Image: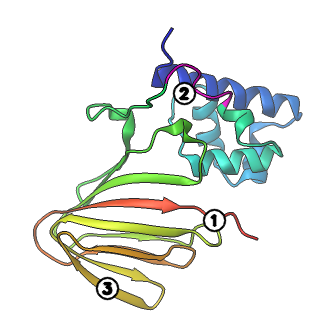
Amino acid sequence: MKDTAAQRIQQIGKRVKEQREAAGLSLDQLSRLSGVSKAMLSQVERSRANPTVVVLLKIASGLGCPLDALLGPGTGGTPIDVVRCDDTRAIYTQSHECTIRTLSPLGTGKNLEFYEILLAGNAALRSQPHFRRTEEYLTVTRGKVRVVSEENTALLRKGDSAHYRADVPHAIENAGAAEARVYLVVKYGMGD
């Protein structure tokens, strides 16, 4: 039987709930320990959310268990993990200014995430610092963007790429009036 994305989300939700109950924690307690909102934890447990690797890392940290305990065993006989272009669950966030679509499969089990970001004209995506030693790799495929990492700034055009620290305040700003598209890889550091 094939392991579909919906089945994987359901399995992760079940494992999170099992680990939480085994630890004797309420949703409120796990929320405080992990830094993940109670609402998100509830959605994950009920298989109503497709959590990012970072969210799962926070949950695992709060539970004091390895990430594999939530992701489960490897993919077995499934050598290719696909994120379909029309899968609405891959939309991480969407507004009139910014659409972020997750391109990395949830079960990668790595500290990497891959995104497609569409920024409306003159819009910006501003981020607070991620985990220590987190880095971002960005490539512009349409438009012109300004990348800001702490006090450093770079202007990028179509075809340009940048690498910068993301453990400091950082931003991706559309420097033009037309929609910009970038591809972003986030490589998470986990502190010391």
Query: Which residue in the protein does label 2 denote?
Result: 9
Q: Amino acid at mark 1?
A: Gly
Assign the C terminus to one quadrant of the image.
Answer: bottom right
Tag 2's secondary structure? Answer: helix
Instruction: Name which residue lies at 80% across and 36% down.
Output: 26
Q: Amino acid at mark 3?
A: Ala
Q: CA distance from mark 3 to mark 1?
A: 23 Å
Q: Earlier in the sequence, mark 2 or mark 3?
A: 2
Image: magenta residue range: 72-78
Tag 3's secondary structure? Answer: strand
**Which mark is on residue 189?**
1
Q: What sort of colour scheme is used for the picture? A: rainbow
Mark 3 neighbour density, 10 Å: few (under 14) some (14–19) many (20 or more): few
Query: Which residue in the protein does label 3 denote?
Result: 154
Q: Are marks 3 and 1 in contact (CB under 8 Å)?
A: no
Relative image position of residue 117 (x, y in whole percent):
30, 57
Instruction: Name which residue lies at 53% across and 45% down.
Output: 52
Tag 1's secondary structure? Answer: loop
Mark 2 neighbour density, 10 Å: few (under 14) some (14–19) many (20 or more): many
**Which mark is on residue 116?**
none
Compare residues 139 and 51 and report the one nearer the observer. 139
Relative image position of residue 7 (x, y in whole percent):
53, 19
Q: Is residue 145 above or below residue 47?
A: below
Q: CA distance from mark 2 to mark 1?
A: 24 Å
Compare residues 16 and 166 and report the one nearer the observer. 166
Instruction: Name which residue lies at 66% across and 43% down.
Output: 38
